[in-house]
Amino acid sequence: MTTRELRLLPDPVLRAKAKRVRNFDAALQRLIDDMVETMRHESGVGLAGNQAGVLQRVAVIQVPEDPEARVLVNPEIIERQGEREVDEGCLSIPGYRGTIKRSVTVRVKALDRQGKPFRLQANGLLAQALEHETDHLNGILYIDHLESHDKLHKVEPEPEESQGAGVG
């Protein structure tokens, strides 16, 4: 596994729409492993292909209660319920957090790393991360959901051992 260079705003790859994955080959498996390694190295909750500089519809997520990282290939949100305000950050926009609206519950369909279809219903931080990473794959950043610039605030870098507030 290799840690990939994290793409930061204003890198145009973050604004591009990722392409559907069609080949579940060794290169995809390496990409997934590298993305998990990068997400953990950066103390993130999730990472999308765009953030690793790859325009493929691949996301990895690991919320604190997950023993292993979740892998989602070609994820698609098929249902959203409710709305709540959340404080959100992003590994690709360091030093800032914003208050935005996210769904309370989401249902997602995706493929696993072998190409097997699955569905997932989530709420809380996992639902937030699923929306955040799916947005990334569509070239959308959390700052695009801000209702006003007053909802964005600068944050001081945290000591390395307490990081992890960025979704992905």
Image (tube, rainbow, N blue to C red):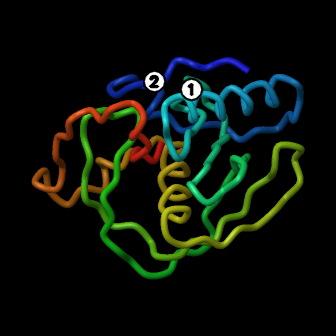
Measure the alpha-carbon separation of dots 1 and 2.
6 Å
Q: Report the side of 62 relative to 28 (left or right).
A: left
Q: Which residue is mark 1?
A: 52
Pointer 1 with pointer 2, Cβ within 8 A: yes
Label 1 element class: helix
Q: Residue at x 64, y 44 (%)?
A: 60
Three-letter code, disc 1? Ala
The quadrant where residue 157 appears: top left
Q: Earlier in the sequence, mark 1 or mark 2?
A: 2
Can you tell which mark lies on residue 73? none
Q: Which residue is mark 2?
A: 7
Q: Report the side of 37 relative to 25 (left or right).
A: left
Residue 47, compared with residue 55, is above or below; it is: below
Q: Residue at x 59, y 19 (%)?
A: 4
Residue 12, compared with residue 114, is above or below; it is: above
Residue 151, compared with residue 162, is above or below; it is: below
Label 2: how many residues lie within 10 Å, few (<14), some (14-19) or many (20+)? some
Q: Residue at x 25, y 59 (%)?
A: 99
Label 1: how many residues lie within 10 Å, few (<14), some (14-19) or many (20+)? many
